[in-house]
């Protein structure tokens, strides 16, 4: 019964929202009938195709492609002026500044020490977070794929934080980890001394990783679960008849057949981990000190927030990050294409 | 074993217990506590008074000190459980406190004043959900304005996203024209360009267009979602072309074909995209953070971040505002979650 009520309610919500949206759209659409019919007489059917593409392409062009191209020019200019035309050309000086280091492993020896702090912090975050995220997502997907009661309910449990905004996620955890919070209540009950979780470097990093996993693991578990459910059941039945042990089934059937999905998930997690910003920024603000300062926050602060605003430098750093992301994205597209080819066979 | 225990521990195969069964149980129960626990703690805390929030160790449920109005005293007096000299306990109300000694009265006989050492008493507390935290931000802060800004951005961006994406998807699925492959390539390419890579020049573009410190500056750059175009195009490809040809025979214009035939038939995919768009735009953070610097334009997310960044964080208000910010997404989670999960499992969009 509860399912039926929920079903009816969800349909009701959609219908009401739909009706509210449709009515004004229909009125406007009807008003446009005559002028657009005239446009069609002028430009023909092909012209209408262009017309339909126009809004989206305009937005793409103005807000994505154009800034992307401008960014390359922007990174070769200096000063604090906002518009490209007012900025002075400095060639590769911004890149030289970013790479001006006597020892790349020690950010203190770099001209732009914050950049290298952010680079190495991000690298550490990416390595730890990707491994843990994929591991937790995989275990969750395996658990959800077992013959459990109310699977859709449990799937929803792990999916819940995915919908929360990064600000809400950050604040929920800040509230738990604050000095008088729930985490310290646990320590207190165990008779241990409270810890200032977000003020200690190690703990701040641990929770930056942990909270980002908490917030997104349901999403990746869902993709992996879909992959697991696509594995034909008769493979397991045949293996069982041959007396194969469950562990062996996992290594010989599940893992190889899940490999394409797993690879997609690894790359997706990787791409998002490189850009980590929102929830960690709200949780720790990059602190304590610069312990959880990551690349996107560095770009944001140098570009917009910091007293030492230097848009050219931020732009150069963002292009370097973009290059890393392009490599990963091409990897992802390559994998997707290979998977598709494999599925067709 | 009790029947309840039997029910809980029963497993399907009936072949006895394997360690993986135990592990599955452990994982699900731990997952339940970890995933819902923090949010429930937030909601629970948001009903505590500022005094209760500052307490350590924190109480699990929101408590307030009980008070009673006593004859002869203007204001209600706080109640305490007191251990009297003869070893019995009584509930007394505090009149005033001097050092370690409190002057207390029995609410039943207010004439007689009892002196009690404060170590011999504990406050009487009752569970009470304090809604003051929710009422005050609406009156004191521009909370309604932030809420309105968030709703405006979410609704406008979703409507424009649905319109522009469905128009583009229509063109890309139902027309043959030169350069279609190139347009598709451009759209794929933009998938590779996250905001963090173009935010510096995008900021100058927005400023040049006069959209800095404008809600439209938040809305417009987000509306051309490549995932939306893809999803809708995929769906429109399944609509038979014969329908369109028949409509053309009946002298329908291309625009009429789009909004009278294609749009209604694409409704299921539009609904999924709408749900995604609402969640995306409601939750947006980095871009509004850059574009909006005037307080009266803040969206909820930006306002929360600003209040959380103050030196003296007013947690009691902040917690309540966070709960309100969570509500639309929780509603989506309860009622529309399956649309999202099938969307992700099917197309891997987020």
Image (cartoon, coloured by chain):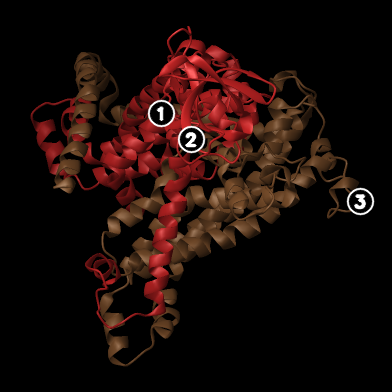
Comparing labels 2 and 3, the label whose residue is closer to the camera? 2
Can residue A334 be seen in this snapshot?
no
**Residue, x 56% and y 32% (percent of image)?**
B121
Q: Is residue B195 left or right of residue A33?
A: right
Q: What secondary structure is marked by label 2?
A: strand
Q: Quadrant of the C terminus of chain B?
A: top left
Q: Chain of mark 1?
A: B
Query: Circle 3 sits on which residue?
Result: A102
Q: Chain of mark 2?
A: B
Q: What secondary structure is marked by label 3?
A: loop
Q: Quadrant of the N terminus of chain B?
A: bottom left
Pinpoint residue A198: horizontal percent, then vertical percent. Answer: 68, 43
Is circle 3 on the same chain as circle 1?
Answer: no
Q: Is residue A102 left or right of residue A287?
A: right
Q: What secondary structure is marked by label 1?
A: loop
How far apart are the two marked residues, 2 and 1, measured between alpha carbons? 28 Å
Query: Circle 2 sits on which residue?
Result: B89
Is circle 2 on the same chain as circle 1?
Answer: yes
Comparing labels 2 and 1, the label whose residue is closer to the camera? 2
Pinpoint residue A126: horizontal percent, then vertical percent. Answer: 64, 55
Asked whether disc 2 touches disc 3, contact meaning CB atoms under 8 Å apart, the reply is: no
Which residue is outermost to the bottom? A242
Pinpoint residue B179: horizontal percent, then vertical percent. Answer: 41, 40
Query: Circle 1 sits on which residue?
Result: B129
Q: Colour of chain A?
A: brown
Foreground residue among A255 and A283: A283
How many marks overall?
3
């Amino acid at each position: 019964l509860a399912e039926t009520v929920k079903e009816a309610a969800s349909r009701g919500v959609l219908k009401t929202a739909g009706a509210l949206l449709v009515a004004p759209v229909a009125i406007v659409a009807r008003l446009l009938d005559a002028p657009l019919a005239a446009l069609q007489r002028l430009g023909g059917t092909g012209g209408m195709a262009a017309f339909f593409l126009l809004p989206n392409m305009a937005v793409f062009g103005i807000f994505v492609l154009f800034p992307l191209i401008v960014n390359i020019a922007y990174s070769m200019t200096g000063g604090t002026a906002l518009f490209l035309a007012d900025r002075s050309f400095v060639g590769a000086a911004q890149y030289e500044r970013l790479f001006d280091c006597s020892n790349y492993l020690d950010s203190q020896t770099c001209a732009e020490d914050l950049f290298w702090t952010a680079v190495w912090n991000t690298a550490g975050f990416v390595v730890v977070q990707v491994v843990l995220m994929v591991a937790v997502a995989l275990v969750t997907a395996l658990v959800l794929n077992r013959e459990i009661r109310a699977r859709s309910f449990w799937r929803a449990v792990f999916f819940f934080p995915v919908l929360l905004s990064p600000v809400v996620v950050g604040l929920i955890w800040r509230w738990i980890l604050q000095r008088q919070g729930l985490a310290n209540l646990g320590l207190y009950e165990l008779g241990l001394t409270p810890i200032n979780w977000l003020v200690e470097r190690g703990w701040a990093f641990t929770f930056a990783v942990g909270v980002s996993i908490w917030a997104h693991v349901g999403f990746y578990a869902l993709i992996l679960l879909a992959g697991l459910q696509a594995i034909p059941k008769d493979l397991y039945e045949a293996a069982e008849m041959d007396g194969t042990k469950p562990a062996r089934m996992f290594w010989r059937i599940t893992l190889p057949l899940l490999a394409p999905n797993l690879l997609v998930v690894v790359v997706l997690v990787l791409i998002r981990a490189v850009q980590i910003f929102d929830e960690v920024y709200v949780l720790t603000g990059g602190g304590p000190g610069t312990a959880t300062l990551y690349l996107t926050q560095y770009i944001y602060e140098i570009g917009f927030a910091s007293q030492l605003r230097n848009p050219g430098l931020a732009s150069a750093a963002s292009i370097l990050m973009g290059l890393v992301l392009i490599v990963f994205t091409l990897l992802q597209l390559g994998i997707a294409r290979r998977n598709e080819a494999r599925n067709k066979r | 074993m009790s029947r309840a225990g039997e029910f809980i521990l029963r497993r399907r195969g009936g072949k006895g217990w394997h360690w993986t069964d135990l592990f599955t149980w452990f994982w699900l129960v731990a997952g339940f506590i970890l995933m819902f626990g923090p949010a429930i703690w937030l909601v629970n805390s948001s009903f505590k008074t500022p005094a209760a929030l500052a307490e350590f160790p924190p109480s699990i449920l929101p408590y307030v000190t009980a008070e009673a109005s006593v004859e002869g005293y203007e204001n209600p007096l706080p109640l305490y459980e007191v251990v009297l000299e003869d070893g019995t306990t009584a509930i007394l109300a505090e009149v005033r406190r001097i050092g370690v000694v409190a002057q207390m009265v029995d609410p039943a006989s207010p004439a007689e004043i009892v002196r009690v050492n404060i170590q011999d008493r504990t406050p009487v507390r009752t569970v009470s959900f304090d809604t003051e935290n929710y009422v005050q931000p609406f009156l004191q802060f521009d909370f309604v304005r932030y809420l309105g800004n968030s709703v405006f951005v979410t609704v406008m961006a979703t409507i424009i996203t649905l319109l522009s994406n469905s128009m583009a998807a229509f063109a890309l699925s139902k027309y043959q024209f030169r350069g279609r492959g190139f347009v598709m390539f451009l759209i794929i390419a933009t998938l590779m360009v996250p905001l963090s890579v173009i935010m510096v020049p995008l900021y100058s573009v927005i400023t040049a267009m006069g959209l800095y410190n404008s809600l439209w500056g938040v809305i417009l750059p987000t509306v051309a979602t490549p995932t939306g175009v893809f999803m809708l195009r995929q769906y429109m490809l399944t609509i038979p072309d014969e329908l369109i040809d028949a409509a053309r025979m009946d002298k329908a214009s291309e625009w009429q074909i789009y909004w009278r035939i294609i749009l209604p038939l694409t409704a299921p995919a539009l609904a999924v995209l709408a749900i995604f768009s609402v969640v995306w735009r409601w939750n947006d953070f980095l871009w509004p953070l850059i574009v909006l610097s005037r307080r009266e334009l803040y969206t909820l997310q930006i306002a929360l971040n600003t209040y959380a960044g103050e030196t003296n964080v007013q947690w009691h208000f902040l917690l309540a505002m966070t709960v309100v910010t969570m509500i639309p997404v929780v509603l989506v989670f309860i009622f529309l979650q399956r649309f999202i999960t099938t969307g992700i499992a099917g197309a891997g969009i987020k």
